[in-house]
Every structure is written in structure tokens, then in C-alpha cells.
């Protein structure tokens, strides 16, 4: 009989020394298994910043395990004999290590879960999958919430969580007498811009990270993204410092300006903590507790604390529930029958639309863009253009450092692209170029005019907005939240409609908007 009792599997987004997989861990009988494999960067073209973040954080976590004297079998990406994929690598290592059982915390990716379950079954080994206590809720909790509902609105779930966990509550009532402060949190900067913005937390790459950067540059040379400005937290200590910096320096202004866009200011007052949260370097309970304490002690206004906490306690938990209760069929959603290819310039930033060039260039440089840039710039254009949803999903999963499928997929297919037909969102999030003009100064320096829908100077977003209304008129007219937008089509005579459609066709042929 094997002397190895349990092999504890740890994935690249499970870097928590207190994870359930370690409950009952005995260094004399158990061992941890971790593997860097190319497939996790190639099943979609993972951007260089994202790959570096994962691999560096994994190697730092391996170092922390060694300091705790937890035996570890670690396979490096550049190791001779690396099988290139998690399942074949695990199968190979099981033959050598011969554990009696496998244990892991529930993974965040359906594809990975099914591959590891199949590998364990083929080896004839039991695989114990434990709840992930990193979250406030279990998937079972969310399934109970969802049972019998035709639509799953985040707001109702969020209120339940506030009450259940007594966050920002005064007895049975929400602090301040209202559940959210969206009306206070949608402001744009004036012509003067944001003024002084506290700098982002920067963590200069150490020897481990520099080694990973060189490996990624060599191994994934053709992948998108740049590494010159890489400074993300890759350890728990760094993640805690980033949390402290946000709470003390930026949270107070986060709420008011969270939807605003300003060129040359990628970081603004946002938290930049989602990557650390999704790698499990931070726990959402400690993040929420710090934000609530800052409100309770008068350091930040309630509108900022609530707006931020809603993203963690509400939205983050909600999208995880959507993912695990709807997969695997959720990945196939395409309610709007969209089949266009993603424009090639999404991978290069080579477009003459100022807003998209700014958002995409920033994304490729840093692996980061804030939520309005994702939803109402890059996501909006893809939705109006009619991009096939899985291509949009692959782009978002690849280019952002915080992208793990359980959180990225519902945000992309449900919230951004309305591919689930309204399970998540009460309407498609559509707007003309006038929205971007209102939220940023980028339109002033753009060759296109957001007020025009046809003609050489017509903003492609505005053109595609009207084309979207024409293509989906019946669907939108039946939705109370979009019916007014559809009624505006009455202003367009037959000639104007044809002109919109012709201009939209030219945009999709690549005759408008591209610099290549």
C-alpha cells in the first residue's frame, strides 16, 4: 500500500494557505501537487501579464508552502517532460506518487473540474472536492435562491446577503435607509479632469517574477500584452498592502467617480484588487470588513463603501452562482444570434476610434481596465457589432489579469453581450457614442462625431447602435426598459434606415474604424 495518504491538488487560482483542501493536512502522510502547464495559457490566447501573474503567484505560493514544511510536488512550465496540460500531467504524476486519494478545493473552472475528475476516475482514485470557503455563499446556497425564479437579478440576491451577513445594516434596515447609491455613483469628471489621483500600489518584480517574465516572453512571444509596467501583487503580504492602500487612499472617492473615464489615467480611484481576490491571496470577508470599518469610523462616505461592497458581497458572489448553476450550457448562449468575428484590432489596439484605442491599448499594456471600460466601451462595441459571444469571452478571459472563467464568463456572456437572453441582465446594455462622450473627453480628440449616425464622420458606435435597434426592433420593443429607445426609430425614414445599415455593413467589412 502507498505510504502517501493524500495528494492535495492546488490550482493557480487557489493560493490560500487556509483553503479547505488543507484541512487535516499531515506533512508526514500528505503532499501538495501543483503544476504549471502551457494549456492554461493556450486554450485561449492568454495575455503575457495574465500568465506572468499566475505563474509568479504560484511560485511564491510554493515558497510559502516550503516555509510551512508542507511537502510539495511542483512541476514547472520549463521542466523537461512537462506534459503541457493539467490532466495528462496529473495522470503521469499519479503513477509515480501513488497516493491513496486526491483532495482539492472546488475549482473555479468547469473545464478543469471535469478534466481532473476524469483523471482521478481513470486512475481508480477517490477525489474529494471540498467547498471553497473563500466565498460568503456556497453554490448550493445560490441554487436555493435561484429555484423557481425566471430571472436572476443581482439586487435581490445582494439584499439577502446584506441581511444574512449583517453588512452595512442598522438592525433590519440598510445603513443610510437605502440599499444602493447608484444615483450618487455615476458622475463624470468635468473638463478639468480628475486632478491628483493617488498612485496605484506597485510591487516591483523580484527575482522569481523576473524569471517568470523572461520565460513568458520566450515561451509565449506571440501572445498579446506587454510586461514593461508589470507590478501586480503576487504574494499575500503584497495583496494586503494593496488593500490597505485602497482603503486609506482611494476608497473615499471611489463611489463618486467609479464610472468615469479619463485618458492617460488607467487606475483612477478603483481598487485593483480583483486579481488578488481571484487568486485567493485576499479573502472577500476581510476586504468587505475593511471597507465597512472605513465607513463606520467616518473615513469614507457611505456611497463609496456601499458601491464597493456591492461589487464584492453582491456581484462577485452572484456571478459565481450563475456560472456554477448554469454550466456547461451557459457557454453556448447566443440569444441575439450574433456571428461576426471579433475585429482583429481588439488584439492590437490598432483602431482610430479614440475610446476603443485607449481602452484596448491600456488593457494590453497593463492587463487591466475598469468595469465601465469593459462593459460600455469594449463590450458595448462587440455587442453592437454582433460578435459571436464565445469570441468575446475568449478575448476577456485572455487579456485581463483578474480573469478566471467563473467570474469572467457570466460578466461577458450575460451582462455585456446579453447572450443568455436576459437571465442576468434586465436589458441589453446598449448606448450610442453620446454615452462615452458624456463619461470621458475622448470624443473631443476623435475623428468621429458621436452625434452623427451616418456619413463619413459618423461615430461607428452610434451607427452600430441604430443598426442594433433596427436588427432587434421586435425584441427591444417588447422590453419595458428598451421600448423607449426603439420608439426613436420612428425618427428615421426609409432612406435613413438604409444609410445606417450600409454604414454598419462597411464597419463590419473593416472599411471604417481600423488602422491596418
Image: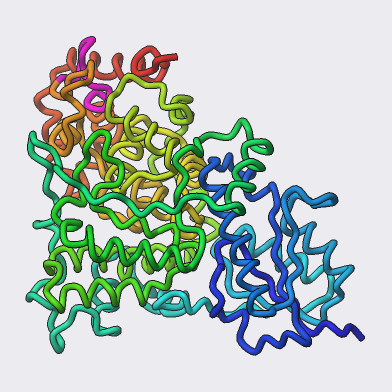
Q: Is residue 94 left or right of residue 417?
A: right
What's the residue at 72%, 58% (across, down)? 86
Q: What is the chief secondary structure element of the magenta stretch?
A: loop
Question: Is residue 283 depicted above or below 200 in this figure?
Answer: below
Query: Splitting the image into 4 quarters, where does residue 9 fall?
Result: bottom right
> Is residue 409 visible from the viewing direction of this image?
no
Question: Is residue 261 depicted above or below 329 in this figure?
Answer: above
Q: How many marks?
A: 0
Q: In this view, which residue lies farthest toward the right?
A: 1
Quarter of the figure that contains the C terminus: top left
* Residue closer to the observer: 450 or 359: 359
Relative image position of residue 320 (x, y in whole percent): 44, 65
What's the residue at 13%, 85% (across, down)? 170
> Is residue 145 visible from the viewing direction of this image?
yes
Q: Is residue 222 magenta?
A: no
Relative image position of residue 189 (x, y in whole percent): 12, 42
Q: Is residue 168 left or right of residue 274?
A: left
What's the residue at 45%, 78% (across, down)? 138
Q: In this view, which residue lies farthest toward the top?
A: 456
Relative image position of residue 145 (x, y in whole percent): 36, 76
Residue range in magenta is 452-463
Amino acid at each position: 500500500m502507498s505510504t502517501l495518504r493524500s495528494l492535495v491538488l492546488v490550482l493557480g487560482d487557489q493560493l490560500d494557505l487556509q483553503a479547505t483542501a488543507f484541512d487535516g493536512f499531515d506533512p508526514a502522510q500528505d503532499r501538495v501537487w501543483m503544476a504549471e502547464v502551457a494549456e492554461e495559457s493556450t486554450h485561449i490566447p492568454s495575455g503575457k501579464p495574465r500568465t506572468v501573474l499566475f505563474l509568479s503567484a504560484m511560485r511564491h505560493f510554493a515558497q510559502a508552502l516550503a516555509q510551512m514544511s508542507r511537502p510539495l510536488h511542483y512541476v514547472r512550465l520549463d521542466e523537461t517532460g512537462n506534459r503541457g496540460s493539467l490532466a495528462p500531467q496529473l495522470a503521469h504524476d499519479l503513477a509515480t506518487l501513488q497516493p491513496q486519494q486526491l483532495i482539492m478545493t472546488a475549482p473555479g473552472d468547469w473545464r478543469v473540474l471535469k478534466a481532473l475528475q476524469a483523471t482521478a476516475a481513470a486512475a481508480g482514485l477517490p477525489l474529494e472536492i471540498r467547498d471553497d470557503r473563500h466565498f460568503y455563499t456556497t453554490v448550493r446556497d445560490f441554487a436555493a435562491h435561484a429555484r423557481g425564479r425566471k430571472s436572476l437579478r443581482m439586487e435581490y440576491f445582494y439584499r439577502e446577503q446584506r441581511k444574512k451577513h449583517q453588512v452595512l445594516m442598522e438592525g433590519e434596515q440598510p445603513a443610510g435607509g437605502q440599499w444602493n447609491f447608484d444615483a450618487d455613483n455615476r458622475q463624470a469628471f468635468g473638463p478639468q479632469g480628475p486632478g491628483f489621483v493617488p498612485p496605484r500600489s506597485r510591487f516591483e518584480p523580484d527575482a522569481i517574477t523576473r524569471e517568470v517574465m523572461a520565460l513568458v516572453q520566450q515561451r509565449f512571444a506571440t501572445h498579446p500584452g506587454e510586461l514593461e509596467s508589470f507590478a501586480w501583487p503576487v504574494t499575500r503580504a503584497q495583496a494586503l498592502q494593496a488593500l490597505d492602500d485602497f482603503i486609506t487612499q482611494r476608497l473615499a472617492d471611489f463611489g463618486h467617480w467609479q464610472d468615469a473615464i479619463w485618458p492617460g489615467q488607467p487606475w483612477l480611484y478603483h481598487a485593483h484588487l480583483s486579481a488578488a481576490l481571484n487568486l485567493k491571496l485576499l479573502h472577500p470577508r476581510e476586504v468587505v470588513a475593511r471597507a465597512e470599518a472605513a465607513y463606520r469610523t467616518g473615513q469614507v462616505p457611505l456611497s463609496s463603501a456601499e458601491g464597493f461592497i456591492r461589487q464584492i458581497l453582491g456581484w462577485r458572489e452572484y456571478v459565481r452562482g450563475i456560472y456554477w448553476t448554469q454550466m456547461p450550457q451557459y457557454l453556448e448562449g447566443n440569444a441575439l444570434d450574433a456571428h461576426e468575428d471579433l475585429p482583429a484590432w481588439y488584439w492590437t489596439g490598432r483602431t482610430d476610434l479614440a475610446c476603443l484605442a485607449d481602452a484596448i491599448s491600456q488593457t494590453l499594456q497593463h492587463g487591466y481596465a475598469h468595469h465601465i471600460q469593459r462593459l460600455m466601451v469594449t463590450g458595448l462595441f462587440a455587442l453592437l457589432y454582433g460578435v459571436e459571444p464565445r469570441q468575446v469571452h475568449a478575448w476577456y478571459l485572455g487579456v485581463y489579469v483578474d480573469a478566471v472563467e467563473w467570474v469572467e464568463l457570466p460578466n461577458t456572456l450575460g451582462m455585456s453581450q446579453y447572450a443568455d437572453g436576459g437571465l442576468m441582465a434586465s436589458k441589453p446594455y446598449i448606448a450610442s457614442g453620446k454615452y462615452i462622450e458624456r463619461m470621458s473627453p475622448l470624443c473631443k480628440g476623435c475623428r468621429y462625431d458621436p452625434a452623427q449616425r451616418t456619413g463619413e464622420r459618423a461615430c461607428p458606435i452610434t451607427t452600430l447602435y441604430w443598426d442594433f435597434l433596427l436588427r432587434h426592433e421586435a425584441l427591444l420593443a417588447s422590453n419595458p426598459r428598451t421600448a423607449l429607445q426603439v420608439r426613436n426609430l420612428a425618427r428615421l425614414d426609409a432612406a435613413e434606415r438604409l444609410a445606417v445599415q450600409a454604414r454598419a455593413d462597411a464597419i463590419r467589412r473593416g472599411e471604417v474604424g481600423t488602422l491596418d
